[in-house]
Structures are given as C-alpha cells and as structure tokens.
Image (cartoon, rainbow, N blue to C red):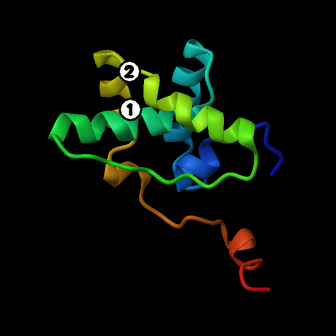
C-alpha cells in the first residue's frame, strides 16, 4: 500500500475489518486538515486523559517528517462531537477482527 505518511493502517489496524471506522477517522482528519494517523493518536491520548492515566503510543516510523506528524498529534485537541463520533466508530465491538486480510496474512513470515 502506498502512503504519503503515517496513515490509518499504521495507527489503527482496523481498516480491513471495519471500513466504516476508518472512514470516520479519515473524515475527521480531512475536516481538520491533518493525517488520519494524527487523529487516531490524538484520540488515544484524549482517552487516557479522560481516565486520568498516561497513554504513551509508540507508532513506528522511518522518516523524520512522519515522526514530526506523530509528535504534532499530541497538540490536537478533539472536541466533544469528534470524540463522541470516534468513540462510536472505534468501539471495540465494531473494530474487532483480523489485522490482515487472508491475502496479506499469506505474506507474513515468507
């Protein structure tokens, strides 16, 4: 899959099994003018703040510009409507499933 930066596939492996969830994250990102991965990271960080715990996501990257995008996600503050939409779209029962498609899984450990 070609990528122009950290995208939803890296930040939220639910893309293959829950396209509606991925679409919601992409829609919010587009409205904000940021990357979907940044929205996913901002949501994770906000969830930790809401429970009074520290969450430290460790997204992988191989380019400095992607690292900078990931760091910038920490300054994104999602509003109540965005949080509610993401909570609904990313509810555990809606995003469960395999991380990879059968075709992709056949490529693992080859």
Residue 22 appears at what percent x and percent y? 55, 39
Residue 50 appears at what percent x and percent y? 20, 34
Residues at marks 1 and 2 touching, judged by CB atoms closer than 8 Å: yes
Q: Residue at x 72, y 79 (%)?
A: 108
- Decide if residue 23 is in sight here: no
Mark 2: secondary structure? loop
**Residue 103 left/right relative to 93:** right
Around disc 1, counting alpha carbons within 10 Å, would you say few (fewer than 14), some (14 to 19), or many (20 or more)?
many
Mark 1: secondary structure? helix
- Label 1 or label 2, whichever comes before in sequence order: 2
Image quadrant holding the C terminus, namely: bottom right
- 29 relative to 58, above or below: above
Q: Residue at x 68, y 72 (%)?
A: 102
- Decide if residue 84 is in sight here: yes
- 98 relative to 84, above or below: below
Instruction: Residue 86: give its label.
Output: 1
Q: Residue at x 34, y 16 (%)?
A: 79
Residue 24 appears at what percent x and percent y? 50, 30
């Amino acid at each position: 899959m070609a990528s122009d930066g950290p995208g939803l596939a890296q930040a939220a492996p639910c893309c293959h099994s829950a396209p509606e969830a991925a679409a919601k994250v992409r829609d919010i990102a587009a409205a904000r003018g940021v990357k979907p991965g940044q929205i996913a990271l901002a949501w994770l960080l906000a969830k930790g703040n809401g429970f009074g715990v520290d969450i430290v996501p460790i997204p992988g990257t191989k380019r400095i510009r992607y690292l900078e995008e990931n760091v910038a996600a920490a300054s994104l503050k999602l509003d109540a409507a965005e949080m509610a939409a993401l909570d609904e779209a990313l509810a555990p029962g809606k995003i469960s499933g395999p991380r990879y498609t059968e075709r992709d899984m056949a490529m693992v450990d080859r």
